[in-house]
Amino acid sequence: MTAYLAKRLAIAAVTLALASIVVFSVLEIVPGDPARVMLGMNASEAQVEQLRQQMGLGGSPMQRYLHWAGNLLSLDFGRSYTYSVPVIDLIAERLAVSLPLALIALALSTAIAIPVGLYAASRRGRAGDAISMGAAQLGVAVPNFWFALLLVYLFAVWLRWLPAGGFPGWSAGVWPALKALLLPALALALPQAAILARVTRSALVDVLSEDYIRTARAKGMPWRKVLWRHALRNALIPVVTIMGLQFAFLLAGTIIIENVFYLPGLGRLVFQAITQRDLIVVESVVMLLVATVIAVNLIVDLSYALVDPRLRNRA
């Protein structure tokens, strides 16, 4: 297990280093002076020079990259010229919204998808399978912002159970904050649940045709026990893979939903930073999301070894 962990950590470190080079290179190839791009053509030379010094644009590209990467490792992401505050403070403030939103959406997606996938696989070829997978196909086809608008109309406008948008902050209390996140989390979860249900059903269909499943049934084991104890566990590897990818997407790909519900999250921060040409914020958030994706993939890789111990010997 130690060798397996060391190999995965080395791959993650190399991937993160390569990603940082790509992100830095994109900033380097922006046409013209990045400081001039951020400040606009009407800025004075003194303002441009001050921002260039703040961004560390002096010296060779290698020196600038090493300076930038070193600051990232020490969690010094620089200072936003739009908000005039450290970028790390902006990220921490917005992450307090985006991270719970992603976790709630993932929990809802899993809670919906696993039972639906189990139900469809256990009734393969029957009406229940066709109805479940038809609903899942519809969930994949419909964009999440349409679900968002439908949920707002149903639960906020008609029933008036939940707020239509905005975020009161965690200082207002846990329940008011969770109520504000519930509709956007559900809008994010429904399409992801549809994908996960189809993957779960497909993995379970393959497992249910194995000899050890027929042996368990021949010994008189109840069908529900066969599904949950034997079939589901052996079908978890593709399911866990999709769950890991979904969490990364839910954390990084919530720009539309956060704008629909007017949530001050990471997605909305990136959108605002792009429109305001605040490249320091953009590159910092992108690197944070890249690191998150790599960390999630590492956790998923390690979970493989826990689900199937045979994989430890193949590492």
Image (cartoon, grey):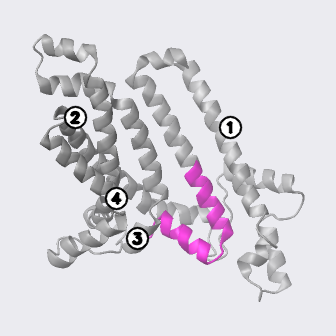
| Labels 2 and 4 touching (C-beta < 8 A) | no
Q: Which amino acid type corresponds to the residue marked 1 in the rendered image? A: Val
Estimate the x, y position of residue 240 in percent, counting from the top left.
Answer: 39, 36
Q: CA distance from mark 3 to mark 4?
A: 25 Å
Q: Residue at x 41, y 62 (%)?
A: 97
Left or right, 207 with reference to 246: left
* Residue beneath disc 2: 121
Q: Secondary structure at mark 2?
A: helix
Answer with mark 3 or mark 4, whichever residue precedes in sequence: 4
* Residue beneath disc 3: 263
| Labels 1 and 2 touching (C-beta < 8 A) | no
- For residue 252, the mark is none
Q: CA distance from mark 1 to mark 2?
A: 39 Å
Estimate the x, y position of residue 48 in percent, counting from the top left.
Answer: 81, 79
Answer with mark 1 or mark 3, whichever residue precedes in sequence: 1
Q: Which amino acid type corresponds to the residue marked 3 in the rendered image? A: Leu
Q: CA distance from mark 3 to mark 2?
A: 38 Å
**Circle nearer the viewer, 3 or 2:** 2
Answer with mark 3 or mark 2, whichever residue precedes in sequence: 2
Taking the image as drawn, is residue 262 in sight? no
Q: How many marks?
A: 4
Of residues 87 and 101, which is closer to you in this image?
A: 101
